[in-house]
Amino acid sequence: MATQIIMDLNGDTRHNFDAKNVKALLEAERRFKALTGAGFTAATRTASGEPVVIRMFDPSVEETLFFPRLVGG
Amino acid sequence: MTLLHDASDRLRRLRAACWQLARALREWYLRPSTRELRGLKLLREWLSREQLAQYDAHRYFDVVGNHTARRYRIYHGNGANVVELNDAALPRTGWCFVPRDHLVAGDVMLAQKIALETDERGALAAANNFTPR
């Protein structure tokens, strides 16, 4: 089961999906494009735990974290 | 004499009960909300072992910028909580950058960590700087 985690006002919202299910995969890709298009950064982790930013939807990624655009405070 | 002793004892017990109640009320008032706990749980999942140990001990953790290898200290908080350290690990410059949406502290710190470790220049370009205390 793959997961997309979106940081939001509730802390985060998680969307789990079966990467072998074509319909679920298309929905996950649509969500990825919608979020990154809205300025969210998508990040995943390497096997050693280091964060990596991804620009394209990758169906093999198990966990993707999205956070809103950063601005000066 | 016994009456006075009894009254004093009751007063002492009442004071202890009030003190206990006040402490319980304070803990209840200061308890983290569910969303704050969720943010902290997510942060903890993404911190390296060293960062997690540092955070648990000091309520801050250090990250290394991916472009310059400079060290930054991210303090618990959701604004004006990032400090660039010099070679002696002393504060050099404060950097203020936060996610556009209002997020809990755990989420803010995690976004700052990922930004500095994957796109240091981009993060600093968005940031305002300040003189750390």
Image (cartoon, coloured by chain):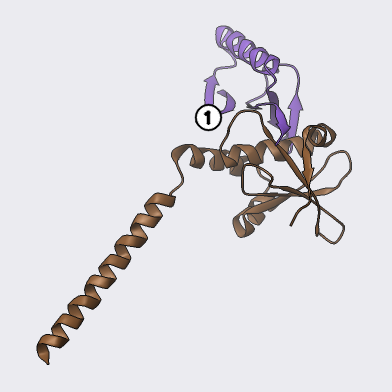
SS of the residue at dot 1? loop
x, y percent for residue A55:
76, 20
x, y percent for residue B63:
76, 47
Residue at 69% x, 18% y: name it. Answer: A36
Q: Is residue A6 visible?
A: yes
Residue at 70% x, 14% y: name it. Answer: A37
Chain letter, brown in picture: B
Figure quadrant of residue A59? top right
Q: Mark 1 — on which chain does it sit?
A: A
- A15 up-or-down from B77: above or below: above
x, y percent for residue A21:
56, 11
Q: Which residue is mark 1?
A: A9
Compared across the picture, whether A17 is left or right of B130 comes to: left
x, y percent for residue B97:
72, 37
Q: Residues within 10 Å of mark 1 (few under 14, many from 20)?
A: some
Residue at 72% x, 31% y: name it. Answer: A71
- Amino acid of disc 1: Leu
In this view, the residue farthest toward the bottom is: B1
Q: Split into 4 quadrants, where in the image is the N terminus of chain B?
A: bottom left
* Drawing shade for chain A: purple
